Amino acid sequence: MSRAKLSQDENLSFKINYQLLPKETNQLDLYFSIPTDMGINADTLNEVDFFNANIKSHSAYYSEQLHLPLVQSRFISQNKREKTGYRLNLNLFCYQLRIALDADVKATLQLKEPDEFFPAAALLVEQTERLLKNLRRYTPPDNKLKPYFQNADNYLSWHTEQTFLKLLSGGPKSSEFNDERATLIGFCQQESQYRTEQTYNSQVTLDDPNRITNKMKLLERLIEYGVVFNKQTTDLTLNLKRLVKGLVTGVIMAFVMFIVLNARSNFQEVTVALIVLLGVIYGLRETFKEDLTQWAWRRIQRKRPKWRNKFKNSVNDDIVCTQTIWLEHIRKKDVPPDVNKLLKQRRQQNKQAAHLMHFCSKNQVHVSEFLPGYEEVQQRITFNMASFVRYLKKGAGKLYALEGQKISKKSVERRYQINLVLRFSTDHSTQIERYKLTMNRSEIVAIELMDEAATE
């Protein structure tokens, strides 16, 4: 069963991941319950600005099979003569190898006992070395294809070395496993020496940590060609907003002209009183025109989608999937019963006055099959809460305590809690969960899943 997973991303952001099958349609709803003392509402937080600056979507091919590159290696040798085909299959291999390595290293770091950690790490070295040999066995003879191979090989070698150094740094320490540790260090030195022999990077670049890191970031983006989709965002409200503005302007102008014509009929000639009256009429028009436009726009736009993301294959520009997005401030009566029920299960002291905001993403896959070896597409939506921080108070203070005959004091910070209800609906099931986001002015301190989570 497909599920949405919410987790923290960086200090002030969190992300939601979920998978899509061919021809599948699903919907993700997020309901933010924001305490009123945070000062965030429709007047202070514009939905359009928040979406453009703080909500990012990402879509790419995905597979649960961590060592899928072993299967993909044969495609590299079969497509040497086709420039586009070789690059695509090379990127599929490299991208999946990177994902597999990162996932396995993360799992290995969870092993805290040395007798479990070092054998698992040694096995990981053996598997990775074999995969890299598979890649390097098929070096293309065509000079037009060599740059693709060299960029991918350079990046994978560097990323592999960095990943295993991270593994050694974060793993347990034990003198009983010096041989295994030496194997890991030797593998890292071997990859570094390999890049030097291939003259992939200049000495100037190697001596500057910023230059080498940024170069590898560029190479990382190059191997995502054909695997990560290109995103094209369309504003669905642009023409509707123009229509509303034109209609409101027309209505106001008709009303003003009606008053002006009546005023002219009551004044036989131009007088000071007529000039003052016309000035007042046009002044009122300019004063209320913007307010009336905003009011009409709010009424018409409510519950309508605002944006559509099209994710296209970077090779042939075909649309793989689309994402239609809603984002708006809502009233309490607009909250669905199942979400409202979950919010009511909070403890009494947490039931404070709150402002509600709703985010919705309806996703649809348009193709009936994916690239060989891939059965799913993974979508990731990242929410940056930096726009919320500007409205928060520092609230620094002191907490005093009596320790024997002495009085101690500790600095404390003010924290805020946002309740977030996630509802993920597919054709076969509905997942609904409540999270509690605790944040201060510098970071999201904690994201807690409440016990009321349910799946239907």
Image: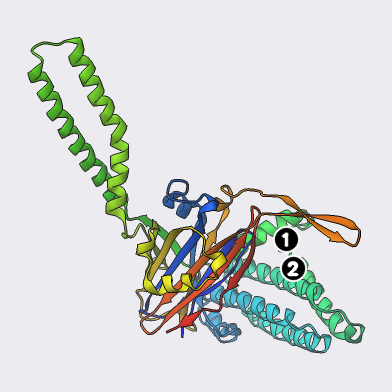
- The quarter of the rendered structure image containing the C terminus is bottom left
Residue 436 quadrant? bottom right
Residue 325 against residue 338 in the figure, above or below: above
x and y percentages locating residue 370 in the rendered image: 42, 79
Point 10% across, 15% down: residue: 267
Query: Which residue is pictured at 48% across the width and 62% down the height?
Result: 32
Residue 212 location in percent, x, y? 72, 58
Secondary structure at numbered mark 2: helix
User: Would you say 5 lies left or right of 10 here?
Assistant: left
Q: Quadrant of residue 405?
A: bottom right
On residue 201, the disc is: 1
Residue 81 appears in the picture as rendered: no
Q: Amino acid at mark 2?
A: Arg
- Name the residue located 63 percent from the left edge and 74 percent from the top edge: 98
Residue 309 sits above or below residue 342 on the image: above
Q: Is residue 346 left or right of residue 456?
A: right
As measured in the structure, the alpha-carbon distance from the residue carrying label 2 to the one carrying label 1 is 7 Å
Q: Residue at label 2?
A: 195
Residues at marks 2 and 1 touching, judged by CB atoms closer than 8 Å:
yes
Q: Nearer the viewer, residue 200 or 12?
A: 12
The amino acid type, in three-letter code, at marker 1 is Asn
Q: Percent x, y for residue 431?
A: 45, 79
Q: Is residue 320 left or right of residue 103?
A: left
Task: Tell me where residue 62 appears, x and y as whole percent.
Answer: 51, 77
The residue carrying pointer 1 sits among few (fewer than 14), some (14 to 19) or many (20 or more) residues within 10 Å by Cα, namely: some
- Mark carried by residue 54: none
